[in-house]
């Protein structure tokens, strides 16, 4: 049994679980998973038994339990500094924290209109002003990150960081819905989808049998 256990929801649907899992995976530490199927009759009971907030993800560590994907990521960055979960330079690190926090708290229309579903493709929803605003802003963030900080690799800050964990579910959403973005953002999408961690998660997601009807 590992010192670390992450509580997650369905890999096909749970965008927040993906964020926490990616950060943990990037540390290279051994860990166990407890997957709780969402939208089932016993989901809330099972979540309450495993997570202080009765939500996913939650991480059990030698230092105690942590819930919320960004808090999990910050803990892992401090505990495993060699994993490079934040950029090395102060300016890039501050910028990465800002865009990660913006993703954490923002883009409500995109979340509602374009839920994550790795097993299926869908027609693009009607582009309301609010949805267009969310998509345009994310495209602008990705282009700005790549232009200013992406010289060392294919990810937002060159190497894979917490910012990429935070935006990975959006990469999945844009792929499922065929969302039109700029060429730099499309190149970034390709890089995330081809990362070993994302391949591992999406492969498992596509093997799940649960179906949630949004």
Image (spheres, helix red, strand yellow):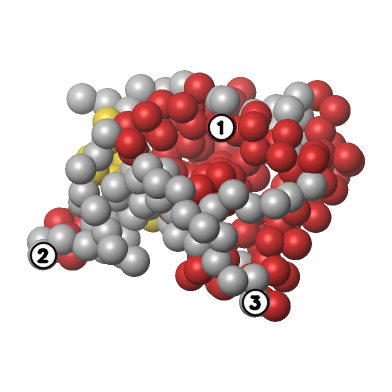
Do the residues bearing badges 1 and 2 touch, measured as CB atoms within 8 Å?
no
Of 187 and 103, which appears nearest the observer?
187
Q: Residues within 10 Å of mark 3 (few under 14, many from 20)?
A: few
Q: CA distance from mark 3 to mark 1?
A: 27 Å
Residue 30, above or below 65: above
Q: Is residue 185 above or below residue 103?
A: above
Q: Residue furthest right?
A: 148
In depth, the one of 64 and 145 nearer the eye is 145
For the N terminus, the image quarter is top left
Which label lies toward us, 3 or 2?
Answer: 3
Residue 119 image offset from top left, x and y in percent:
37, 42
Residue placed furthest toward the front: 123
Picture coordinates of residue 211 (x, y %)?
24, 53
Q: Which mark is residue 193?
A: 1
- Please tell me which residue is depicted at 65% across the width and 29% down the height of the picture: 191
Q: Of the residues tagged 3 and 1, which is closer to the observer?
A: 3
Mark 3 — residue? 128
């Amino acid at each position: 049994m590992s010192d670390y256990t992450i509580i997650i929801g369905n890999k096909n649907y749970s965008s927040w679980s993906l964020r926490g899992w990616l950060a943990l995976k990037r540390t290279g530490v051994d860990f166990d998973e407890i997957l709780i199927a969402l939208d089932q009759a016993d989901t809330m009971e099972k979540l309450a038994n495993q997570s202080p907030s009765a939500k996913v993800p939650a991480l059990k560590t030698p230092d105690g339990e942590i819930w919320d994907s960004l808090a999990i990521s910050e803990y892992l960055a401090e505990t495993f500094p060699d994993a490079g979960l934040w950029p090395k330079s102060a300016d890039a690190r501050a910028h990465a924290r800002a865009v990660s926090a913006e993703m954490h708290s923002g883009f409500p229309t995109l979340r509602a209109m374009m839920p994550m579903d790795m097993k299926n493709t869908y027609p693009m929803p009607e582009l309301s002003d609010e949805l267009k605003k969310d998509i345009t802003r994310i495209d602008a963030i990705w282009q700005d990150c790549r232009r200013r900080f992406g010289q060392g690799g294919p990810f937002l800050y060159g190497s894979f960081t917490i910012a990429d964990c935070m935006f990975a579910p959006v990469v999945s959403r844009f792929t499922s819905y065929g969302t039109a973005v700029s060429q730099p953002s499309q190149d970034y999408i390709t890089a995330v989808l081809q990362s070993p961690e994302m391949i591992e998660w999406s492969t498992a997601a596509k093997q799940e049998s649960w179906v949630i009807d949004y």
